Image (cartoon, helix red, strand yellow):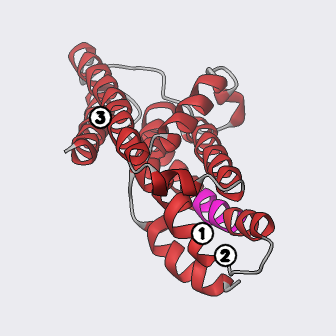
Amino acid sequence: MNIWAFVAVTLPLVLTPGVSTAVVLRTGVTRGTAAAIVTAAGLNASSLTYGVMAALGLPAVARRWPIVLVVLRYAGGASLLWMGASATVRGISRFRGASTSSEERPPSDGTFGDVARADNARLFVEGYIANTLNPPIAAFYFLILPQFVPAGDPAVRSTLVLTLIHVSMAGTWHVAWAIAGGALAARLSAGRPRASLEIGTGVALSALALAIIL
């Protein structure tokens, strides 16, 4: 098993902004760093699930029935579009109700005490679903990762090792985006700047969803 070759192929995929980074950034901007980290945990739990499925031989199903990836594409695009539209509507509502002299309470400063007051389960599940319905992730685990499992090696063990490598890389990257989103939200903590930021992230998510669907 050539781990370095796998890392060389996987790293650019991890660093390329996509659905997962957009979802983490959106949560960081709207809910703070800690909430975004909870969402990132859901994303990477989904990747672990895909890794287990790949170890059990399910990639053969996707190769035999490509319609599986097509269904994931449209379901994932619809889910992401809903997230983007929700963020946009929420931002517009905030913008209309804000005034330049508004003294709103700042959003979460990123501490885990703050995120404890949020619905952690919902954030985790939202990240899990977003990643599960993300076509590039399904293609990665069903089509790309199996190519790095040498013939003759224990398939289950090799697949799980490669899965852990990918999740470690992606998880680190997601935490970085969570911190960036939370810091940006804290800097633009109230009023119209915060609303504009939320609208911007919602529009970006919606555009990404349309790119996936179309």
Disc 2, SS: loop
For image coordinates 30% across by 38% down, the residue present is: 197
CA neighbours of label 1 inside 10 A, class few (<14), some (14 to 19), many (20+): many
Q: Nearer the viewer, residue 8 or 100?
A: 8
Q: Position of residue 177 (x, y in %)?
A: 50, 54
Q: Is residue 148 above or below residue 104?
A: below
Q: Which residues are magenta?
A: 164-172
Q: Which residue is mark 3?
A: 202
Q: Residue 68: which quarter of the image?
A: top left
Q: Position of residue 9 (x, y in %)?
A: 50, 78
**Mark closer to the chain start, 1 or 3:** 1
Asked if the residue under mark 2 is in contact with the one under mark 1, i.e. CB atoms within 8 Å, the reply is yes
What kind of residue is marked 1? Pro
CA neighbours of label 2 inside 10 A, class few (<14), some (14 to 19), many (20+): many
Q: Which residue is mark 1?
A: 146
Dominant secondary-structure state across the stretch colored magenta: helix
Q: Position of residue 167 (x, y in %)?
A: 65, 59
CA neighbours of label 3 inside 10 A, class few (<14), some (14 to 19), many (20+): many
What kind of residue is marked 3? Gly
